[in-house]
Structure formats: C-alpha cells, structure tokens
Image (tube, grey):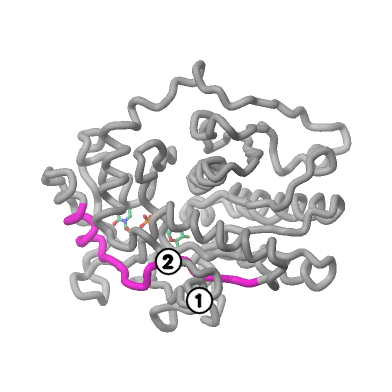
Amino acid sequence: YVGSHMAKTLTELGDSVTVLDNLSTGHRDAVPERARLVVSDLSQRGFLHNFLEQNDFDAVMHFASCIDVAESVRDPGKYYQNNVTNTLKLLDAMIANNVRRFVFSSTAAVYGEPKYCPIDEGHPLQPINPYGYSKYMVEKILADFDRAYGLKYVTLRYFNAAGAAPDGSLGERHDPETHLIPLLLQVAAGKREYLEVFGLDYDTPDGTCIRDYVHVSDICSAHLGALDALLSDSPSATYNLGNGGGYSVLEVIAAVEDVSGRRLDIREAARRAGDPARLVADAARARRELSWSPRYPGIRQIVEHAWDWETRFKSASRPLAKQKAPVVSARPLANS
Ligand code: UFG
C-alpha cells in the first residue's frame, strides 16, 4: 500500500525506481508504468546479493512487511521470519554491496500500551504483540548496523496510514481487509453488509478507540524528507508520523457517512484484543527536522480521497494484461 504510493511519488519526480515485490499481498497493477518491477523475495539471500551488486542504488526503502497484528499473534513465526530475518538478509546484502542508506517503515505498535499521549519518540518501547516486536527488533538491528557498519537509516513510525492518492489513481487494497476506513467504504459501497465497532466502553469521550490517521501522501512526503536527509549525510534518526489529533471510531464512521451520503449499518462488538484506547502521535520532531508538513491532516479529506478511489477508480484499475511495468521474474539461486 504505502510502497505503491511511494513508487508513484518518486517516478513522478523523475527518480529511477525499482520495486522488489513477491506479490504475496502487492499488486502488479499498483506499480507505476515508469518503475521497474522485479518479482522476487527477501528470503532469497543469493538473489539479493546479485541484485544489489548489479544495480547502483542510492537508497533502499523497505515496505515489505507483514502488518496484521491479529495474525502476528496467531502465527508469530511468519512475522519474525519475514519482518526480522528477511530484513536482516536485505541489510546484509546492502552492506556487502556498499548501499548504506535505508528508510524503514516502523509502526506505533512499537510503543505498546501508551503511558502518555501524544506519544513522542522518547516514549518507552514495550510492544504487546509479535508484529510490534518484529519492528522493534529491526529498529535495534539498525542502530547496531549504524555503529558497526556505518549504515545510515531513517526509521518512520507510522500511526494509522490511510487514504488514497488525491488524483484518484491509487488506493488501499488489502485482502483480507482489516482496516477501519476501507472496511467502512466497502459498507458504504454496498460490498459489505455492516461494520462491527470493536468496543464502545473505552475511556474516551464517546467510548470508542481514538487513532491518529495520517494520509498516505503525507507519509510519502515524509519519506522524501528522509531521503533528502540521508543524501545530505544527516545522522540516522527515528520519527513518528501522525497528525497529533486523533479521531474516534464513531467520528470516522460519521465522516464516511457524510462523504458517501449513505447511512451505514453499524453493529456493536466486543473489544478487539490488543487495541489501546488512544494512540496519538507527537510528530514535532519530523516537522522540525524533516520539514514535514502534512497537507491532508483532517479525516474528511482522507476519507474523501479514499471514497473517490473506492467508487470511481478501484473497479476500473488497469487489467493485468494491459499493465506495462516491465517484469523481471527472478529465480532463487542455489545458494539462497
Ligand atoms: N475497528 C473497528 N472495527 C473494524 C476494524 C477496526 O472498530 O472492523 C477499530 C479498531 O478497534 C481500532 C480502529 O478501528 O480502534 C482502527 O483499527 P485499524 O485496524 O484500522 O488500525 P489499528 O489501529 O489496529 O492498526 C494500526 C496499523 C497497524 C499498527 C497499529 C498500531 O494499521 O499496522 O495501528 O497499534 F500496528
């Protein structure tokens, strides 16, 4: 999701972009026509070494993680394998080939149950699920790789990534979908019958959980800031990405009803395990050091862009046969 928007942003700026994706959850037709798509997998150590040796990359941005918190509790092995072990293989191959700039997609889940809100980067890191731990472990690895091998990195801790490209060309497509906004849009579009609100008894003004939704385009602009910092030899750093306000589940539902002009069938359900009542970012550091200034901080615009894509563009996505991104299918090497 975020990676496809980043590839779009970079190609529109004229940068040369190579997308490495095993297409387990990604979509071929989400790769911009001007980007090169290489279909392979971070588990393939030999491939990674050859790939980095044969190309001359200025930097690597890493979006290829498993992100479903509930699944990480059911199947932690998958999360540690992909999110930690495979990231380590990527980093090893980078160091071996002298590629030393890295932008890492981390998460608010590294903080666990917040001790205070808004959460700044100095907040204790106490993840409460394997997903959060997997990202936390990579953060630790990055710090060690900087000290030992001179890897320069920017870690971006996303709060709730949401929304679609303002030009309507690209959105959010998870399968299965678990995120609040796309689920609500599917209800509004008649593709899903109802939405269950997980808990109305939280200690918040309306009893539902509060989250800090951050527009995917704003996440991309933070990545550009991170890239600039790395290219100008700034030291490694870690930043929260959020708007610092936060909206409750009921407020998001109201925004979707408002934007779509439809009343949604909403049902009360039990709390979802591991959901903190409130997760709101203090992103002052990113604003200050990356000159980050989110363009779409309000929930209404986030929902408007996502609804636009859901209704006008999603069904009209380019059919696979017509997609033009060049595809290189890499076979695992014997020593991988
Ligand atoms: N929610 C519902 N019903 C649903 C789906 C979600 O009520 O059907 C609620 C959740 O309980 C939560 C809010 O809507 O309060 C947002 O839920 P999402 O699943 O959209 O997002 P999360 O806050 O659970 O997840 C986000 C990121 C994760 C990250 C996590 C950190 O997507 O990658 O924040 O806690 F790990």
Q: Quadrant of the C terminus?
A: top right
Let me know if residue 37 is in the magenta part. no
Residue 41 position within the rendered picture, expressed as x and y whole percent measured from the top left = 69, 38
Say above or below: 146 vs 92: below
Q: Secondary structure at mark 1?
A: helix
Residue wearing tag 2:
293
Q: How many marks can you see? A: 2
Q: Secondary structure at mark 2?
A: loop
**Residue 176 visible in the current orientation:** no
Residue 300 position within the rendered picture, expressed as x and y whole percent measured from the top left = 24, 56
Residue wearing tag 1:
288
Q: Residue at x 59, y 54 (%)?
A: 76
Q: Where, by quadrant of the figure, is residue 48 drawn?
A: top right
Report the residue that reaches farthest toward the front: 14
In the image, which residues are magenta?
237-255
Which residue type does callout 2 highlight? Ser
Q: Where, by quadrant of the figure, is residue 282 drawn?
A: bottom left
Q: Residue at x 55, y 58 (%)?
A: 223
